[in-house]
């Protein structure tokens, strides 16, 4: 089979499209033929040597995707050959085939296509966690969503709107306006630096927003703190492509709350993973949640996908097709 590995830490040129022996499922595992694999910032972080540092190179990339079951290992009863499935976290998903624990998989309804499933698993579960658990948006709440045209931001905007919230969306360029507005942003700010605070205050009558989602860079982080109202909440996704820095707790203004939100820490059982995924699929089927495509790439072109995502010029979700 074909797969994509990183031979070393570095830029996109460390990615290689290689042949590997077809995998065989161990007891408790499932072998899946990958129909679509999602490209995430996490994959770039791994390539840059920030995550998965304990795994030696060359190592496979990708964690998310959708496809069909090709074989099941001993003891697997929840899935059978031919079943349509999706997953949010299975290292090595940039491949034609992958084995993973059966508990990592969720059933994929027949009316949800593979590309959509690969677009909403990690990003959708993240967005759902942000808006329903980390800060449960209430009717009338005002949220500032950074990267509102991105894979997470566009889904997050839609979920906030489903819960009755108002969204001030921030994008870095006019090219991203269409996706953000189609996702349902109420007020759009086009800003590539940290100068959005005055606009947020104007739009909220000087009060600030109830919650900020995203804003990983240093300038966006500091400005986001000033955009919050008193006792507001900052849902921070982590440093992503920038090095993290220490936060001086006593410098945080206005009794705000801040947290590093990772959905995987809150979806700890297979039952909960399937429940949350089923909710996402229901929203998609009902026309309440739309995954915006940022581009499809051949599996062999993974380096191009990484370059495009890392440039911050894309909108929506990037997908690899084996």
Image (spheres, helix red, strand yellow):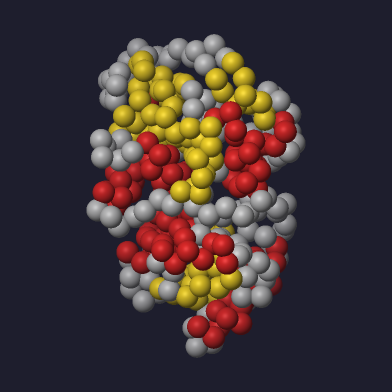
Number of disc labels: 0
Between 57 and 249, which is closer to the camera in this rendering?
57
Task: Determine the residue located farthest toward the bottom in the rendered image.
Answer: 205
- Residue 249 shows in this picture: no
- Residue 77 is left or right of residue 261, and the answer is left
Between 46 and 177, which is closer to the camera in this rendering?
177
Between 178 and 311, which is closer to the camera in this rendering?
178
Q: Residue at x 61, y 64 (%)?
A: 172
Residue 152 coordinates in the image, percent (x, y): 48, 54
The answer to whether 164 is drawn above or below residue 21 in the figure is: below
The answer to whether 18 is drawn above or below residue 256 in the figure is: above
Q: Residue at x 68, y 23 (%)?
A: 58
Residue 166 coordinates in the image, percent (x, y): 40, 73
Between 98 and 184, which is closer to the camera in this rendering?
184
Q: Residue at x 41, y 46 (%)?
A: 120
**Which of the 4 quarters of the picture holds residue 201?**
bottom right
- Residue 214 shows in this picture: yes
Residue 174 coordinates in the image, percent (x, y): 57, 67
- Residue 271 is left or right of residue 143, and the answer is left
The answer to whether 290 is drawn above or below residue 172 in the figure is: above
Q: Residue at x 54, y 30 (%)?
A: 299
**Which of the 4 quarters of the picture holds residue 110?**
top left
Residue 8 coordinates in the image, percent (x, y): 73, 29
- Residue 90 is left or right of residue 221, and the answer is left
């Amino acid at each position: 089979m074909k797969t994509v590995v990183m031979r070393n830490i570095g830029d996109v040129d460390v990615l290689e499209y290689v042949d590997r022996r077809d995998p065989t499922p161990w007891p408790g595992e499932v072998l899946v033929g990958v129909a679509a694999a999602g490209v995430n910032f996490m994959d770039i972080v791994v390539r840059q040597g920030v995550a998965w540092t304990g795994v030696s190179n060359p190592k496979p990339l990708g964690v998310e995707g959708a496809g069909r079951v090709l074989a099941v290992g001993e003891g697997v009863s929840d899935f059978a050959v031919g079943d349509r499935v999706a997953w949010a976290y299975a290292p090595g998903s940039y491949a034609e085939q992958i084995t993973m624990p059966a508990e990592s998989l969720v059933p994929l309804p027949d009316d949800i296509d593979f590309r959509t499933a690969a677009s909403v698993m990690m990003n959708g579960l993240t967005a759902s966690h942000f808006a329903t658990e980390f800060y449960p948006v209430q009717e009338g709440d005002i949220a500032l969503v950074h990267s509102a045209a991105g894979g997470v931001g566009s889904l997050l905007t839609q979920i906030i709107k489903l819960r009755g919230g108002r969204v001030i969306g921030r994008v870095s360029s006019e090219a991203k306006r269409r996706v953000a507005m189609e996702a349902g942003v109420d007020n759009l700010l086009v800003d590539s630096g940290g100068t959005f605070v005055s606009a947020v205050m104007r739009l909220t009558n000087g009060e600030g927003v109830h919650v900020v989602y995203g804003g990983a860079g240093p300038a966006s982080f500091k400005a986001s703190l000033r955009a919050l109202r008193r006792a507001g909440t900052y849902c921070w996704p982590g440093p992503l492509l920038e090095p993290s820095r220490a936060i001086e707790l006593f410098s945080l203004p206005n009794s705000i709350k801040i947290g590093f939100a990772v959905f995987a820490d809150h979806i700890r059982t297979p039952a909960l993973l399937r429940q949350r995924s089923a909710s996402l699929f229901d929203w998609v089927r009902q026309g309440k949640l739309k995954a915006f495509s940022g581009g499809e790439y051949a599996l062999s072109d993974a380096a191009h996908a990484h370059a495009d995502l890392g440039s911050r010029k894309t909108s929506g979700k990037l997908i690899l097709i084996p």
